[in-house]
Image (tube, grey):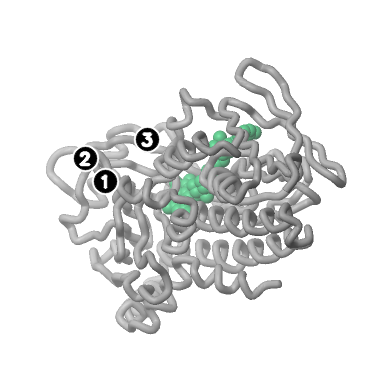
Amino acid sequence: MQRSDRVIVIGAGPVGLCLSLALAQEGVRVSLIEQLGEHNFLDQIPRAGTNHPATLEMFERIGLYRRIEPRGIIAPIFHYWDRENDELVAAFDHGHLKDDTRFPYVLQCERIKIVEEALAMAKAHPDIDLRLATTFTSFAQTADGVTAHVTDAAGESEAIEGRYLVSGEGARSIVRKDLDIEFEGFTYPDRTLNIEVAYDFRQHGYAERNYISDPTEWSNLFHWKGPPDRWRVHFPTEPADDPDALQRPEALQARLQRFRPKSGDYEICGSNLYTVHQRVARKFRVGRAILAGDSAHVNSPIGAMGMNSGVHDAFNLADKLIRILRREAEEGELDRYERQRRHVAVKHTQAQTIRNKRLLAERDSAVRRRNHDELRRTAEDPKLARAFLLRSSLIESLREAEQIQ
Ligand SMILES: Cc1cc2nc3c(=O)[nH]c(=O)nc-3n(C[C@H](O)[C@H](O)[C@H](O)COP(=O)(O)OP(=O)(O)OC[C@H]3O[C@@H](n4cnc5c(N)ncnc54)[C@H](O)[C@@H]3O)c2cc1C
């Protein structure tokens, strides 16, 4: 490998960090550019947190799993609930995947803990030139290489040279926009309200991870390790709702009390509102510039597929870049990356997350009954349950992508 075979990675989110570590551990030099600095890196709003088995295998490969496992909650079982009838519909046990993965469970561990641990690993790696508090502004490419233009906290500009540029910048990717790549799909008109609360919902029979259907107010409920332990509850809102009114303390209390009445107030640790997009970039690569993670695809968090599938992009891409830079593969391998990962984004993550939301929000009582009966039957039959879990945990998507040449 030549010294100039540097890969420039924009964004130290889960995708940019995993990619940088996977590359550097195989001897590829990386420049990792992140706009956040030491002082505000951990001040990011709560986002992803459910890590599927295949993702845990990838974290293990780069030595990240052992750092995050103690900070998370191992959750082999997840639930579907019917809120209207306050009834547990189905309990899915990842134990059915014991012959498919070394990790027959999800790890409930928030994105912020993952990036904190991965950032510490990146800082310690001699082949990662980590630039915090440095903003990527534009890039140019030729047949031989790329130049990324960045500005540091002091306002100093610099041009960084490399062989490839990967956008792990998240949904607002400058690279995607500069390349004029269409972000195809749609945005839901309503926003989702997230409330973080210190209260143990297991006393009501919930698992660590719950999807709760309701014709008027569906919900998700997830447990995170503290101290203090917190639960994240998601609720739908109406497009016309005033964001400030939705997040007033009394409004949050009222929502939670309607969800699970209890004596006294809930201890609320935080709240935020987010907009949900279902979009996939028309192309994942133009020449030496490549998109990965949210920069290439975004979806609803119902089903926990955004960060997971982004991390899968990172490892798929790392393996190809390593082989290309070692002159063991042609650059055409990058087109295979696009074929494989775009297929997963469209046929798996988009399709499943759209279906998941429809399932939770279904209003027709006959359809709801049919859906619930099917979920019940699936969870109770080991063969059907395994097939369902292979899909929901994205293992099937990885196996299918492997077949794409
Ligand atoms: C409420 C919520 C819950 C979610 N839950 C889940 C879940 O349970 N499981 C799951 O799989 N997914 C979930 N997701 C989705 C998940 O958070 C994202 O898919 C994931 O964070 C994408 O990772 P990324 O590295 O591609 O981008 P990001 O996490 O967005 O990281 C991008 C990084 O790039 C940096 N950056 C951006 N622009 C620049 C620039 N110009 N210069 C330098 N740096 C830049 C940013 O500061 C950031 O650090 C959830 C999302 C939301 C909103």
Q: Which residue occupies the extreme top position in the image?
A: 154
Q: Position of residue 77 (x, y in %)?
A: 30, 65
Say if residue 302 shows up in the picture: no
The residue under the point 30% across, 57% down is: 74
What kind of residue is marked 1? Leu
Query: Is ligand 1 less than 8 Å from the beta carbon at label 3?
Result: no
Between residues 255 and 302, which one lies in front from this camera angle? Answer: 302
Query: Is ligand 1 less than 8 Å from the beta carbon at label 1?
Result: no
> Are there few (<14), some (14-19), or many (20+) residues within 10 Å of tag 2?
some
Q: Position of residue 52 (x, y in %)?
A: 42, 60
**Residue matched to label 2:** 266
**Residue matched to label 3:** 247
Q: Are marks 3 and 1 in contact (CB under 8 Å)?
A: no
Q: Are marks 2 and 1 in contact (CB under 8 Å)?
A: yes
The residue under the point 52% across, 26% down is: 37
- Ranked by sequence position, the earlier of labels 3 and 1 is 3
Q: Position of residue 287 (x, y in %)?
A: 80, 50
* Relative horizontal placement of residue 205, taking residue 126 as reference (left or right): left
* Relative horizontal placement of residue 355, taking residue 10 as reference (left or right): left
What kind of residue is marked 2? Tyr
